[in-house]
């Protein structure tokens, strides 16, 4: 089964086209309401709990969910569903230990936190800011590769063009939409995306199961010729690696931190995370059921990443199929725009506005952010055409991103918020050691295979050695160097307390 064999129904195309028009309208609305860099990056900090929950869920449930995870379930069966437990564990840690405190801090990007908490670098935190911005831009270039690849598959199915051209079309649409609308458009599209995704998936499940003969039939038929499809196809090391990558990443994910900054206050953040978890649970179950059902109905797809698109064209009918493809596009666009905004902020806010031209006007900073979106949005097009370097299948590319950024930021963020002794040399060492170890481990296991199998047999993902190296480097370097300054501690700790361990009351008052 290939995409070229599909005859696109005009009604199907109309539903998808209507959705794209809605996205354009939202982008224009965002453009009209965006007057400053804060508007562009954090929507004026006006996001409420319902929209906040939708935007957290939509940003996380990207192409890696409705295309990538769908394809993994098609290829390997229901066992991959365990990855969600890692994500939910990460969200719970964030809910208790990280997200509310970051919102009280109330800046624009994750690198603002890094620069403030690790400010004793001789340049007021500028070196720490530059290191973190570099890691974010490089890591998200890999992530965007997965997103534009998935969008290219969808555009290829709709437009009937070659994959390189489809990938380019997807990237151009996403870049234009993000550069015009900014964060205001992004969070509104996320709300639409969350509704469309949940409704589309819930409607698709009963229809797909009816055609397949029910859950019992799917289970018995698949189990009869490949038991792992209804059992467990992954090793314990792989599963633990997948879950660890998800958990460590989500605690300090730069794109989610920007969403958290955009919310009204810390109470809103807590409620939004709860809403997000409900939406994620619905999608986790429906995607697993649809993936294995499609393996029964269409067992010979040229690539597993096509499973959702083929289902929409051949199984769901023009209206529901168009709605499901709109959900896929929504998932992709919501993630691309959030990642592009964070990556552009790494260049425009963290490097240009904070390091190069601190006196730049709001209008200039706004347009530098938009220009950065355009430039950074086109790089992944070239990477997408060589995606085998990052794992090939979309979901494996997504997991690599989780590993890289989780390795770099989990320890510096968590310890920076809760360990008063953590200092600037330790924080920077943690970022560099974590990111560097994850990169070397990936290259040594998936590209050139120079890491001994005695290690890879028990360690299934780069995030495990990456986070371990980050913790060891941060703690070791912290203890062999001086104590942090009051300036780096003041925004996060009560400097009048005897033990210095409580939150600074002035920070709470900012709410």
Image (cartoon, helix red, strand yellow):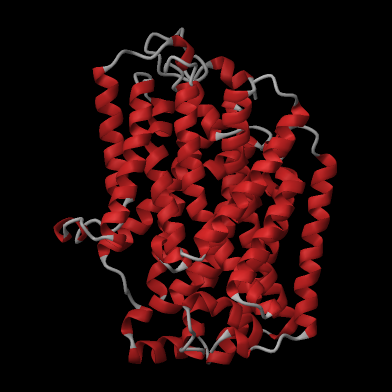
Q: Can residue 43 be spotted in the picture?
A: no
| Residue 250: x %, y % from top left | 47, 47
**Residue at 37% of width from left, 80% of height from top?**
229
Q: Can residue 436 be spotted in the picture?
A: yes
| Residue 358: x %, y % from top left | 64, 20
Front in this rendered view, residue 390 or 85: 390
**Residue at 32% of width from left, 55% of height from top?**
442
| Residue 111: x %, y % from top left | 52, 31
**Residue at 64% of width from left, 70% of height from top?**
166
338 to the left or right of 306? right
| Residue 73: x %, y % from top left | 44, 74
Choose top left, top right, bottom left or bottom right for residue 362: top right
As drawn, 64 above or below 295: above
Choose top left, top right, bottom left or bottom right for residue 84: bottom left
Front in this rendered view, residue 458 or 355: 355
**Residue at 48% of width from left, 66% of height from top?**
394
Front in this rendered view, residue 270 or 463: 463
């Amino acid at each position: 089964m290939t995409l070229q064999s599909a005859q696109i129904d005009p009604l199907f195309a109309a539903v998808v086209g209507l959705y794209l028009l809605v996205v354009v309208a939202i982008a224009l609305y965002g453009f009209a309401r965006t007057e400053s860099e804060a508007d562009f990056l954090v929507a004026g900090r006006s996001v409420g709990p319902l929209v906040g929950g939708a935007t957290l869920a939509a940003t996380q449930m990207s192409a890696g969910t409705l295309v990538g995870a769908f394809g993994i379930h098609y290829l390997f069966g229901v066992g991959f569903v365990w990855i969600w437990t890692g994500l939910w564990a990460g969200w719970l840690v964030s809910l208790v230990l990280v997200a509310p405190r970051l919102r009280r801090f109330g800046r624009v990007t994750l690198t603002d936190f890094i620069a403030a908490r690790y400010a004793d670098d001789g340049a007021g935190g500028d070196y720490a800011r530059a290191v973190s911005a570099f890691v974010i831009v490089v890591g998200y270039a890999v992530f965007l590769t997965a997103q534009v690849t998935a969008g290219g598959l969808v555009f290829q199915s709709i437009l009937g063009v070659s994959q390189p051209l489809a990938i380019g079309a997807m990237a151009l649409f996403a870049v234009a939409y993000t550069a015009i609308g900014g964060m205001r458009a992004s969070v509104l599209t996320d709300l639409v995306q969350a509704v469309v995704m949940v409704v589309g998936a819930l409607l698709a499940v009963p229809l797909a199961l009816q055609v397949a003969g029910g859950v019992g039939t799917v289970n018995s038929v698949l189990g009869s010729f490949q038991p792992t499809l209804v059992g467990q196809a992954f090793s314990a090391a792989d599963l633990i690696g997948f879950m660890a990558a998800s958990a460590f990443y989500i605690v300090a994910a730069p794109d989610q931190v920007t969403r958290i900054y955009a919310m009204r206050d810390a109470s809103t953040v807590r409620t939004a995370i709860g809403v997000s978890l409900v939406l994620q649970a619905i999608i986790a179950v429906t995607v697993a059921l649809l993936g294995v059902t499609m393996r029964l109905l269409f067992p010979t797809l040229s690539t597993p990443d096509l499973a959702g698109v083929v289902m929409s064209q051949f199984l769901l009918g023009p209206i529901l199929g168009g709605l499901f493809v709109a959900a896929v596009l929504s998932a992709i666009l919501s993630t691309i725009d959030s990642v592009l905004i964070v990556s552009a902020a790494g260049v425009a806010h963290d490097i240009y506005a904070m390091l190069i031209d601190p006196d730049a006007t709001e209008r200039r900073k706004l347009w530098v952010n938009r220009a950065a979106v355009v430039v950074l949005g086109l790089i992944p097009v070239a990477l997408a055409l060589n995606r085998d370097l990052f794992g090939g299948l979309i979901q494996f590319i997504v997991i690599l991103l989780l590993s890289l950024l989780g390795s770099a930021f989990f320890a510096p963020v968590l310890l920076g918020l809760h360990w008063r002794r953590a200092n600037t040399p330790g924080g920077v060492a943690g970022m560099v050691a974590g990111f560097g170890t994850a990169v070397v481990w990936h290259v040594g296991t998936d590209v050139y295979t120079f890491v001994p199998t005695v290690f890879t047999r028990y360690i299934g993902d780069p995030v495990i050695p990456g986070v371990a190296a980050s913790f060891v480097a941060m703690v070791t370097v912290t203890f062999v160097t001086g104590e942090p300054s009051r300036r780096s501690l003041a925004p996060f700790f009560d400097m009048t307390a005897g033990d210095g361990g409580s939150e600074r009351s002035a920070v709470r008052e900012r709410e």
